[in-house]
Amino acid sequence: MEQFLQQLINGISLGSIYALMALGYTMVYGIIKLINFAHGDVYMLGAFVGYFCMTFLKLGFFPSLLISMVVCALLGVTIEKIAYKPLRDATRISVLITAIGVSLFLEYGTMFFVKPDPRSYPPLTGFLSESYSLGNLVFRGKQILIICITIVLMALLQFIVKKTRIGKAMRAVSLDRDAAQLMGISVDRTISFTFLIGSALAGAAGILVGIYYNSINPLMGMMPGLKAFVAAVFGGIGIIPGAMIGGYFIGLVEVMVSGYGNSMYRDAVVFAILIIILIVKPSGLLGKETREKV
Amino acid sequence: MKEFVKTSSKNRWLSLARKWAVLLMIYVIVQVLISANIINDYIFSTFVTVCINIILAVSLNLITGFTGQFSLGHAGFMSIGAYTCALITLRYSSQVGFIGGLLLGAVLAALVGIFVGLPTLRLKGDYLAIATLGMAEIIKILFRNVLEDLTNGAAGLSGIPQFVNWTWLFIFTVGTVVLVSNFINSSHGRACISVREDEIAAEAMGINSTKYKVMAFVTGAFFAGIAGAIYSSYFYYIAPDLFGFMKSIDILVIVVLGGMGSISGSVISAIVLALISTYLQSFPELRMVIYGVLLILIMLFRPQGIMGSRELSLSVMKKWIQGIRRRNGGIA
Amino acid sequence: MPILTVNKLSKSFGGLMAVSNVSMELEQGELVGLIGPNGAGKTTVFNLLTGIYPPTSGYITLYRNNKKEEIQGLKPYTICKKGIARTFQNIRLFKDLTVLDNVRIAMNKNASYGLISSFFHTKSYGIQEKEVLEKSIELLRILKLDHKKDELAKNLPYGEQRQLEIIRALATNPCILLLDEPAAGMNPAETAQLTEMIEWIRKNFNLTILLIEHDMSLVMKICERIYVLDYGMVIAEGTPSEIKSNKRVIEAYLGEEMGNA
């Protein structure tokens, strides 16, 4: 039982990371129907920016987090402007290929400059290096931090989406781009803003992973990126609460498979979940079927 | 009407004979150069890479370019062919073993193609892409972990006997290009293309779109299996990580650059990219950065790739030459 | 002799009842019209007839070769093979293919050689391909589009694209042809040409035709009978003159002027 609860804690921590990334995927997909392959690499760059801030600029965690999020937000907007915007009316496959191209560029460009060897985050002090026990359960300070920050960010996101004008604009554009435009909404700005938030969240996830697992490398974004995408699909692609649910679900599944089964299979299980979802209910847990008009 | 068809069939015979003559010449010339050791091992290994890439690109093009099904898991089929052929030749090291292993590998890849294709080919566009990617990852994990006793896991199989020579290479490469071409120029091929163009309209015209999607997928898998077998039987070492997502992307870049829907485009771009890879061998990261930028630039500025959906032929080349002549003010 | 009967056909999408208890009957060789305001469910009826989606309830029965067969819920390609062909409201040609290829694809039934023949271009491939080619060119010639056979479908002028849609449907050798707004976007001259073409193909291809159309001049001129749909239900059925003077139809769709025409 205790092991289960321990795994639960681990799963929720990991799930938080996936949830933050899945949100970026789902929002971008919701608004321009693109699987942003480069999203995992924005996350990776968030980790590297955090590393740079904490190691070379000797900044504390929170300033680094902020810088990470800002840099990634700007990166996301830039990518959208250069690579995705010109293809807004092209076929979905064209944009997907472009996204793959951006992903390759970011991964290997980073590798070219920082070399493929993994880097370690500097040792953490204070709260972050502590562990707290409750009976036989161990809560590491890092885990508490991840969960808290994730909750704060998700709450912030909900607020933006539900209560602000730009949030309403985001929802409108994802439902019907042309109608939104006719209502006076600037589609370009709304899409840019979507990328901005999504990428900021990915950046946060990156630096959180950096302090959690301590090791970062230029290719670290691929697997988590794919798994976060699976999470988004599981919860219902394009649906924000779905991404949150999906993220935690995948995190828990992965931890449970590692803990109780064989950690070798954890990737396979996640992909198997993807295949099953796509076959049984492609619109995901919270999704609704949409039909093509003939 | 009958006359029109008769003379054109005579023309067709001539052009066919011409093509085979050219191919035979290429075979003989290269064979001679190899025997005279002008083409040494190093150069030949580039030939092998080019030919394997041609087979992979043409087979992926059938699935993605001609039938419009975006598959990101092609390397998975390649690995099935590679491992099957390797395991068989390690046990039965002979020409028969090689061919048997190759064919079995291709057939197994095709069977997996049916197994993977039937449930997933209902999905559209990006969903299918991710599903196929997931399938390829699962296959990789299968070879790396589940079948570890058989495949030696992540360490890979080495010492695979080398049976691939220029003759086999030539036969399989030309064979793949010819068979896939023939398929495209048949009622089955047209049906596949119609599924790409407009699946709903194709169904309304009597075409079972699922059947043709699976047909293209399985055929593509079969030839990818052959490519894998050739790889293992020349480079004598294979490991699961060689056949991951990056390999599938490699093949995709070739297809996109050459033109989705053009077989000659795939052949040309396979040659071009193999040369670039060899040139950039010492800078693997730079190569991938270039690939990434290439994909973006192609999609932004020339999404139809080099050849678009046209094929290289004498008439197309004549038009290009005429176009160049005209641009130079009529001075050839 | 009825060739197609539709019995209490209904289709709902989520909560929306797009088609509600529609019953129709087509006699062999008839030219029947299906009219109604936009959103009345006419294309949905076509989609149900051609298997794009299954009905929520109801039956569609095809009478052919002295046999009757229920075809609701069957896949589109199966229904096409049974002899029902259609055109689309928004043209769905194979745009990047030539006119000839568009027709050849629809003739797929005639190329029944197997995969081996395809891969190796055997004799049976050669013979059947030649046949398909000749039949396609002949069909284009009869319908006066053969001079453009090597043109890409997307490069055809609008009127010829609509024409090609019909030719392509004919290539599947149907006994029933469903035309979805074939005259949409056409000027009066083109519409007159189209009207002639429809009459001509009905006679020469021995077809039964069901026609969705908004252009009343076309409908009233060539349709022998008309069904009127509104909010997914049949609100009237009869000859053109009966429909023209039907109060409900005038209210829902035709308007006073048409009624008095």
Image (cartoon, coloured by chain):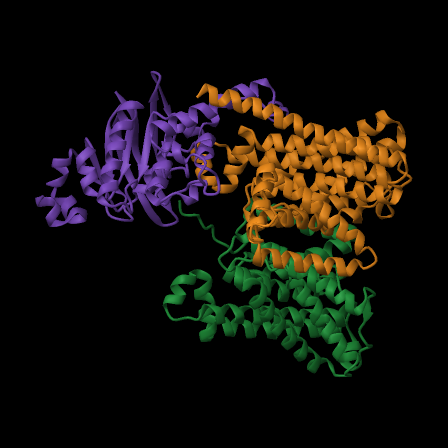
Image location (x, y in percent) of residue C175: 34, 25
Residue B282 location, x and y as percent? 84, 58
Q: Which chain is orange in the rendering?
A: B
Q: Residue furthest left?
A: C260
Residue shown at 57%/54% (left/top)? B302
Vertical arrangement, residue B209 with respect to residue A180, above or below: above
**For residue C63, which quarter of the picture?**
top left
Direction from residue B127 to residue B292 in the image, left or right: right
Residue at far front of view? B331
- Chain shown in purple: C
**Residue A70 to residue A19: above or below:** below
**What percent of the width, then of the height, locates residue C211?**
27, 36
What is the number of callouts on the image?
Answer: 0
Q: Is residue C157 visible?
A: yes
For this orientation, the residue located farthest to the top is C66
Quarter residue C186 falls in: top left
Q: Nearer the viewer, residue C166 or B12?
A: B12
| Residue C120 as seen in the image, left or right of residue B188 | right
> What tint does the image give chain A?
green
Q: Quadrant of the N terminus of chain B?
A: top left
B181 on left or right of A140: left
Q: Quadrant of residue B57?
A: top right
**Which residue does the image show at 56% across and 50% down from the upper left?**
B330
Does residue B114 appear in the picture of this structure?
no
x, y (%) of residue A201?
62, 70
Q: What residue is drawn where x is 85% and y is 42%?
A: B235
Q: Nearer the viewer, residue A196 or C106?
A: C106
